[in-house]
Amino acid sequence: MPFTKLLGFKLFLIIAGVMAVGTWIFSAVTVNWHTEQYMRNAVQNVGRVSDVIQRSMHYSMLLNRREDIDHIIRTVGNEPGIEAIRIYNKEGEITFSSDTGEVGATVNFSNNACSACHAADAALLTPSSSDLIRIFQSENNERVIGKITPIKNESSCATAACHAHPESQTVLGVLDVMVPLKDFDASLAELKSAQYTNAVILAAAVTLFTGIFIWLMVNIPVKKLIQGTEQVRAGNLQHRIDLQSNDEIGTLADSFNSMTNDLRSAQEELQQWTRTLEERVREKTEELRRAQTNMIQVEKMVSLGTLAATVAHELNNPLEGVLTYAKLLKRRLQSEAFTDTLKHDIDSDLTTMADETARCGNIVKNLLLFSRQKVGEFRESDVVAILNQSFKLIDHHLQMHNIKLETSLPSTPPMVQCDANQLEQAFLAIEINAVEAMPGGGTLRVEVLEEQATDSPAPMGLAPRPIGTSGLRLRFSDTGTGIRDEDLPYIFEPFYTTKHDGKGTGLGLAVVYGIIERHGGSIQVQSRVHQGTTFTITLPRQHVPSEAPATGVPTRLAVEHV
């Protein structure tokens, strides 16, 4: 932190400023008081000198001894500390002076020495004692204080035989005594210099002492407090502030140390709780992992049991028929002759047995396709070419059921990485389902659309689309009987079929789902009863290996009800 921003420095500046101003004011008041005392002494001094001179001349004036008066004035006027002595008569003429060259000169009543008693119209005034004192500059530019003392007409003067004055004349003249203030000014200047010097020394000493005091009692403790807070902010709760003081800062330091102790205790408790919580979380996680493993194993066993029961049930029906017809044929061969009617019945029974045996083979084959984990070799293939091949295979079915095929295919071959045989099988399964859903005829429409890159996830239960890759969208729409709402969520589950004539195995759409899933695509269904069904398949351009479960069994599919 810059020195100028420290609290101690700011306090030091404030105290130094207050000290400087206070010392200056005190020194000025002291000097002014001493100046007034010096001037009072100077006035008293010149008054005493004037009284002494007047008293020393009093007897000579009564006897009119002018020589004695002149001698006294010149003798006293030449003494050190006397600037000049004059006596003026009532006409303003200098009758006596310490400077003999001034005797006989007349002064103007308008000057400073006379204006106190004489007005502009020469009328006499009665001045106060302060008006009889004047201070002026001498010819050598030194200050001089002068006092005018009126020489009053006393009764002894009015009745003297030497020169009587009428009693109506109150003032015979004035005594003007002038004393230089050189010594007074020198003493005053020395006093001022000493006073201000002492004031500066005192202010400097007090300011220095104050600065040291602030540094020791404020700045250092505050610095320690700042260091302590920085240590705590850095996480060092072991830090303690070592301040041995009984003032507020010491109390603050003790409170700070108590706070860090409490924080340290709280932190240790939190760390202990954290370690305990982490250990408990690890234990619970391990328990959950074991539980999940067990659950997965149980689900696998349940799925395997369900699958086995379903396969056994599906295979039992045709095998039961084959066994029944085999026993019937054996009994007929033992008890009857070979007539044409018997041959025809045996041929019909053998045909039924062959159909049921083929049905068992289809169940086993579709089951193997459904459980297959990998498809064949992936290479770039034209999806339109694959579709056209599937159209050829169902062409006779379309003609037999009076179904019209409409296509909307791109002119440029859309290429994707895929297993062409597997995709053809998936397309063919969807198309055959559409044909079977339109026994009275209808329209099968197949569209291929370009799909731009998307960040949207695939529908629930299907393989996720790779983020940021483009692909193809294939739409198979029929105008058949549609799928009921309650059947839609289960149509991709194995062995779930809506065909009740014994022709369906419930593995066709499950195989389709597995193929599309392993190609990294997705499949959606929209259907409305008596209006038709639309299967939408989305395939990525580049193959991304699927992360589907090993069994390939789809979870319940999210479908759209329209």
Image (spheres, helix red, strand yellow):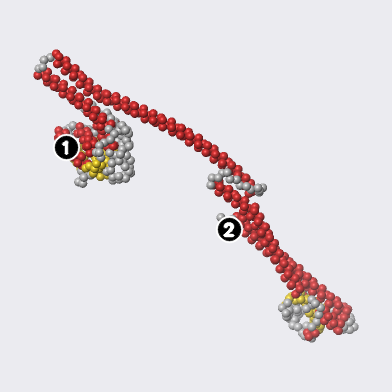
Residue that numbered label 1 is attached to: 392
Which residue is depicted at the point 24% across and 22% down?
Answer: 316
* Residue beneath disc 2: 4
- In terms of secondary structure, where does tag 1 sit? helix
Label 1: few (<14), some (14–19) or many (≥20) C-alpha neighbours in 10 Å: few
Q: Is residue 91 visible in the rendered structure shown here?
A: no
Q: Residues within 10 Å of mark 2 (few under 14, many from 20)?
A: few
Q: Is residue 64 left or right of residue 134?
A: right
- Is residue 337 shown above or below 277? above
Quadrant in the picture for the N terminus: bottom right
Residue found 36% across the figure and 27% down from its top: 298
Instruction: Give the camera-side residue of 378 and 226.
Output: 378
Q: Name which quarter of the figure residue 286 lies in.
A: top left
Instruction: Classify residue 78 by image quadrant.
Output: bottom right
Q: Is 144 drawn above or below residue 357 in the view shown?
A: below
* Mark 2 secondary-structure assignment: helix
Q: Position of residue 188 (x, y in %)?
A: 74, 70
Q: Is residue 535 left or right of residue 337?
A: right
Residue 206 numbered mark, or none: none
Q: In the picture provided, is 46 more to the left or to the right than 311?
A: right
Inspect the image, locate mark 1, and give the three-letter code of the amino acid beneath it.
Answer: Lys
User: Which residue is painted at 20% across and 43% down in the image?
Assistant: 409
User: Residue 445 sits in which quadrant?
Assistant: top left
Residue under the point 20% across and 32% down: 436
- The quadrant the C terminus occupies is top left
Q: Sequence-wise, which precedes: disc 2 or disc 1?
A: 2
The extreme front residue here reads 377
Q: Where's residue 541, x and y in %?
A: 27, 43
In this rendering, position of residue 445 left or right of residue 242: left
Q: Which amino acid lies under the numbered mark 2 shown in the image of this protein?
A: Thr
The x, y position of residue 337, in whole percent, is: 11, 15
